[in-house]
Amino acid sequence: MFLVSNEEMVVAALECGITAAIPAANYRKKGELARAIANIKAKTDKPFGINLVVNKSNTRYKQQLSEIINAKPAFIITSLGNPKQAIEMAHANGIKVFCDVVDLKFAQKVESLGADAIIAVNSKAGGHSGIFPPEKLMPELVDNCHTPIIYAGGIARKQDVDKALEMGAAGVSIGTIFIASEECKVSDEYKKAVVEYGAKDIVMTRKLSGSPTAVINTPYLQQIGNKPNIWERLVNGNSALKKFAKSVMMKAGMKKLYNSAFKATYKTVWCAGVSIEHVHKVRPIREIIADLTE
């Protein structure tokens, strides 16, 4: 979870028996990502991973991949692009790669590239969401892929975990409900929003990165709207400008998310998924995990 996951949260999760990951995008300066991986390794020998955006909107991709490979976390989670290079370099260094996908076509593509697991991102996910509900996406992937499928989107309770496993998932990927954890360092306003808003308040916007992103429908978002403006539509319709525009949008969107996550501002754009429906208070990570597993 961009700007949400941190080293303390990862260590807390590992000590409770699950794994965790931090987005490479959290670290802006050269060497910071490698140091973060080393810091976590100094506190635990349990496996954890790093999320990596692999398309051209990520101008730090090569630097981030190099730092990850050298620091050797247990796995990489790729998203928003072709993971071929990341898979090849990771496998050459004993690192597994799990790939976010939103449909069968991309699942089969990453499987052909050697992905160690496929993360089936459904329409209930927070942040960069999927396009299909889990009831459609999971059966298609389970029936047509030979790689383990990880269910992602809408998990908040043990019954959600059990349902995902019954659908053939090898595991589940959970994000939103950990925003409202004591170990999370986002603003109290962000945590309060996760507690007080519900599933009906989650909307999709393309204004952050150019890709559909699930966010909380705050008064500010209602003010600016969640649909692309005329300029954004024209640029996205022009193949020559699209990649450049996405890079610009991604950079601006990341700055907006940073300001929303850590500063007191009315311009709030908070990423979250529909699982906020079942978040009722801020708790330690160990309690959240216990509810998911016991």
Image: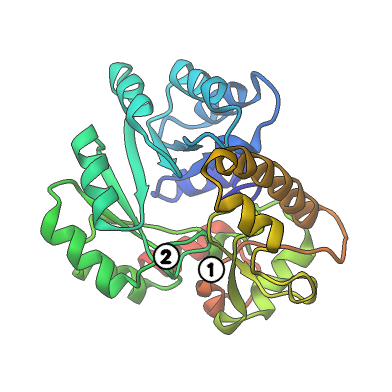
* Whole-number angstrom distance, CA of label 2 to CA of label 1: 7 Å
What is the three-letter code of the residue carrying label 1? Gly
Q: Is residue 113 left or right of residue 35?
A: left
Q: Residues within 10 Å of mark 1 (few under 14, many from 20)?
A: many
Residue hosting label 1: 273
Placement of 62 over or under 216, stated as above or below: above
Placement of 216 over or under 7, stated as above or below: below
SS assignment at label 1? loop
Residue in the picture at 53% in, 43% down = 10
Whichever of callouts 2 and 1 sits on the residue coming sooner in the sequence is 2
Can residue 209 be seen? no
Residue in the picture at 23% in, 55% down = 170
Tag count? 2
Can residue 141 be seen? yes
Residue hosting label 2: 153
Placement of 73 over or under 218, stated as above or below: above
